[in-house]
Amino acid sequence: MITSTCLSINEENHLTIGGIDTTKLAAKYGTPLYVLDEDTIRANCRLYTESMNRFYDGNGLILYASKALCNTALCKIVASENMGVDVVSGGELYTAHKAGVPMDKVYFHGNNKTADELELALSLGVGRFIVDNRDELLLLNSLCEKMGKKASILFRVTPGIDAHTHDFIMTGQIDCKFGVVLETGDAMDIIRLASTLENVTVVGVHCHIGSQIFDLDPFCEAAKVMVNFMGDVKDTLGLTLTELNLGGGFGICYTEADDPIPYDKYMEAVSKVVKETTAKRGLPLPKILMEPGRSIVGSAGITLYTVGSVKPIPDVRNYLAVDGGMGDNPRYMLYEAEYEFLLANRAGDEKNEVYTIAGKCCESGDLLGEHIALPKAKPGDVLAVLATGAYNYSMASNYNRIPRPAMVMTSGGKERVVVKRETYEDVIKNDCE
Ligand SMILES: *Cc1c(COP(=O)(O)O)cnc(C)c1O
């Protein structure tokens, strides 16, 4: 089953992406190869930006959570779609800067930003800091003083919503490495402290309740809890917060078991809750921020591999080994993430064999999937793994000194390389002796 609209099968029975034959891409650029369809990425961006206009009078900003996939090409694309960028490290910040993303639209997250990273962000003029904890607040304030800068900040709040159950288990989220807890009073205390500091201005609050969520309710519940907290801040401290950042986490389709909600539905539902709750609390409408990552790039990308060997172990399993693996996609190894697989050069053939897809690294756990139905495969076949646009390249490593793959982007029936394949020289470039 092919779930992404950029994918199709041509008359030669080959998988296509953005109208381009993937077997030709594999032959031209080599494998493993990441391929993303830019037109799909832009369409995903517009679903969010247009819904912000339609349901909330454009009083907000969509931030691309760049940890899903961060490179200069992608930062340029999202910036040209009038989105901002959410970064969680100096490296992501530097990438956004080099891509020319306007710094006032960059939001700096992370639960342990270093002094060096904060200084870089201050000197580049980053728009907002999402402050995680008390130590970071004090560090940021003192760095501002040292550098003669002021910082606009939001606090990351743990609203006590468990997105992965339907019971909203309130205690489930107190144990979290991110943010300050709302229900224990920590969140109020830190805002009180911040309001006494010279060099920071608290403009809002942020929450991010999880990832790969398929349900509107947790987002609506989080929005309600957060607006009520903004009401409490006003009542207790006399401080009117003007920004509400509701994070990301919108689910995508990896296999046919996944049934995502159209992304504009989130904005529609959340803006209704925000409007109702602010009215009830007598608050002005805040600027809303949303931070989709996976749902911008995930289903726009595929990975192509070449099959190297097929090894049946009778009564045990059939191994099919490819020329990549955990180095370019660690998600199966990390959390048994499921994907859709097909043979790109015989894309429409009946899937009458079952394989364990193995990578080429020296780890038995280096698998891309198990119990995967495919046509009978042989060396030289091109294996396509679908919906690998998010959290694949961004999590890639050089384990076993394997160079990271190239990334190609398709648009309007043409393709271009946006990230070069690493060379062996790249692999040793930091070795000093
Ligand atoms: C990971 C993350 C996101 C993006 O999550 P997706 O599931 O990729 O949409 C957004 N905001 C924050 C703070 C995050 O940590």
Image (cartoon, rainbow, N blue to C red):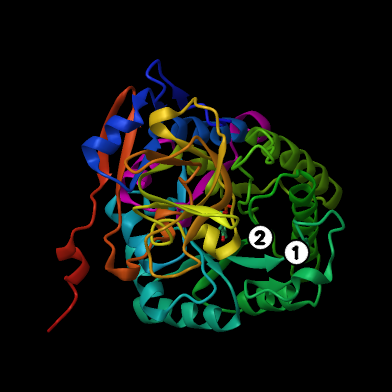
Q: What range of the chain is rendered magenta?
A: 53-82
Quarter containing the N terminus = top right
Q: Is 370 located above or below residue 411 in the figure?
A: below
Q: Which mark is residue 108?
A: none
In the rendered structure, does residue 148 fall within the stretch colored magenta?
no
Q: Depth check: give the residue in front, 363 or 311.
A: 311
Q: Residue 264: in sight, yes or no?
A: yes
- Left or right of 368, for residue 185: right
Q: Which mark is residue 159?
A: 1
Q: Position of residue 421 (x, y in %)?
A: 24, 52
- Left or right of 192, for residue 141: left
Quadrant of ligand 1 in image:
bottom right
- Left or right of 169, for residue 339: left
- Mark 2 and mark 1 lie on one chain; the one further toward the N terminus is 1
Quarter containing the C terminus = bottom left
Q: Amino acid at mark 1?
A: Pro
Q: Is 376 located above or below residue 109 in the figure?
A: above
Q: Amino acid at mark 2?
A: Cys
Check disc 1: other Cα within 10 Å, few if <14, some if 14-19, many if 20+: many
Q: Residue shown at 67%/32% (left/top)?
A: 55
Judged from the image, the secondary structure of the residue bearing numbered disc 1 is: loop
Q: Which residue is mark 2?
A: 207
Q: Depth check: give the residue in front, 95 or 314.
A: 314
Q: Position of residue 238 (x, y in %)?
A: 74, 66
| Tags 2 and 1 touching, CB below 8 Å | yes
In the rendered structure, does residue 73 fall within the stretch colored magenta?
yes
